[in-house]
Image (cartoon, coloured by chain):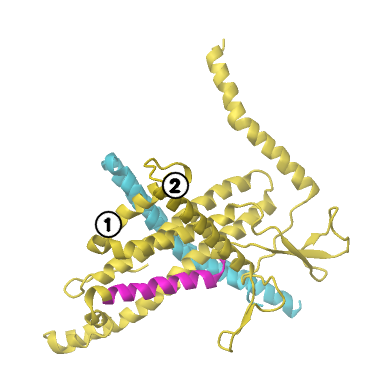
Amino acid sequence: MADPKQDAGKKSKFKEIGLPLLIAAVLGAIGWYFFPPIMPHVQLPAEKLTHHPLISLPMPIGDIYLTNTLVATFLVDLVLLALVFAVQKAAKSGDLIPRGIVGVFEATLEAIYNLTETTAGKWTKVIFPYFATFFFVVLIANWTELLPGVDSIGFLHKVEEGVHGYAAQGPFLIKQPGPYHVTPWVRVASTDLNFTIALALVSVFMTQVIGVRALGLPYFTKFFNIKAIFTVKPWWMGLIDFFVSILEIISETAKIISFSFRLFGNLFAGSVMLFVIGYLVPVLLQSAVLLLEAFVGIVQALVFGMLTLMFMALATHPHGGEHEEAHA
Amino acid sequence: MDAQSIITAAKLIGAGLAMIGALGGGIGIGLSANGAVQGIARNPDVAGPIQTNMILGIAFAEAVAIYCLVVALLILFVVK
């Protein structure tokens, strides 16, 4: 006694959800049958793509190679530039209705601008560019993880016997026995500590610059509170204040570490998890993990930007009476 | 038992021990979700901002667990 209307609804639901899932499962099973996945080879430092260094600098820095995370960084820059030109074109055309990617961009910008305004107050115009830049760079860098081919297409190189590796197969490969490893051409930029530490250094350094802009040289009494020794009434309380101000230096350094390792750890663990899930359950489950990784990517980008915003906003406040805690 | 297998065993045990620190992150995430759900139950109108702030708090709590994961991965894949 099925209602024909309900029946039609069931059918369309099957067409919308069930059929694609079935097709994906069958395709995944076929791929799993012909190219069985192997335990992934995990390497922490970025892989070098060239044998000769791009630039040779004097010793403290050394040779700079073209690594696959550097390629990903260039890709991120290209995507960002394309976005910039698309938005600029739309803004110049005088069309007041934002369409497509420009609309998404405008909505995102408005949301994070309002967020900046509630935290930073009159310093919004100074702080907002850093927040927005960090947000978009980190977001696009994180989301390259979701593209097929990233982390999986690259050079094959032979490894010694006894190590897990791919057997060379397929029409275009010269069949030499022995396991191979893949050196991917593109690897997510955020899985390289150099990228995240560079962002963290920029963030913390510009925080100091904005602090000096807001408060002038007295900003540095946050770090060397010599004045407190002479002004605070019981002399030992002043001494304690002085040592607390020295501790601020350590907390500032710890910011660099926490900024960089949070982003690096989340994204590196994410890509390792993608590989391991693909090895253990090659059918369907990886799609769910990709969804989770998309969420982690946007949350980490937002966290990086918002922490920068909060530290910068804190630096513009004169410190003194109240004790503000900002740890992360 | 040769030296290499002892070293491998020690690395695996060390990585496992390093992940004990994820306990703290788990407790933190649970507490923040607890607080957020209580807040939403009392005042469902502010569910949106509470959710946003909860996710931010979870990201910070999770960061501590992620440090442990980084240490574990370093032990597994970098230490020779």
From the viewer's perspective, is A122 left or right of A68?
Answer: left
Residue A39: % across, % down? 71, 59
On whether disc 1 and disc 2 are found on a single subunit, the reply is yes
Q: Which residue is mark 2?
A: A102
Residue A211: % across, % down? 28, 74
Q: Residue at x 30, y 72 (%)?
A: A210
- Three-letter code for the amino acid on which mark 2 is drawn: Val
Q: What colour denotes chain A?
A: yellow
Determine the main secondary structure of the stretch shown in magenta. helix
Quadrant of the rendered image containing residue A251: bottom left
Q: Is residue B34 visible?
A: no
Given the image, what chain letter belongs to the residue carrying mark 1?
A
Boundaries of the magenta span: A191-212
The reply to whether the magenta stretch includes residue A198 is: yes
The reply to whether the magenta stretch includes residue A163 is: no
Locate the C terminus of chain A by quadrant.
bottom left
Secondary structure of the residue carrying tag 1 is helix
Q: Is residue A241 above or below residue A316?
A: below
Residue A193: % across, % down? 54, 71
Q: Which residue is mark 1?
A: A117
Among the chains, which one is cyan?
B
Secondary structure of the residue carrying tag 2 is helix
- Three-letter code for the amino acid on which mark 1 is drawn: Glu
Q: Is residue B78 visible?
A: yes
In this view of the protein, which residue sits in the foreground, B80 or A120?
A120
Locate the N terminus of chain A by quadrant.
top right
The outermost residue toward the front is A93
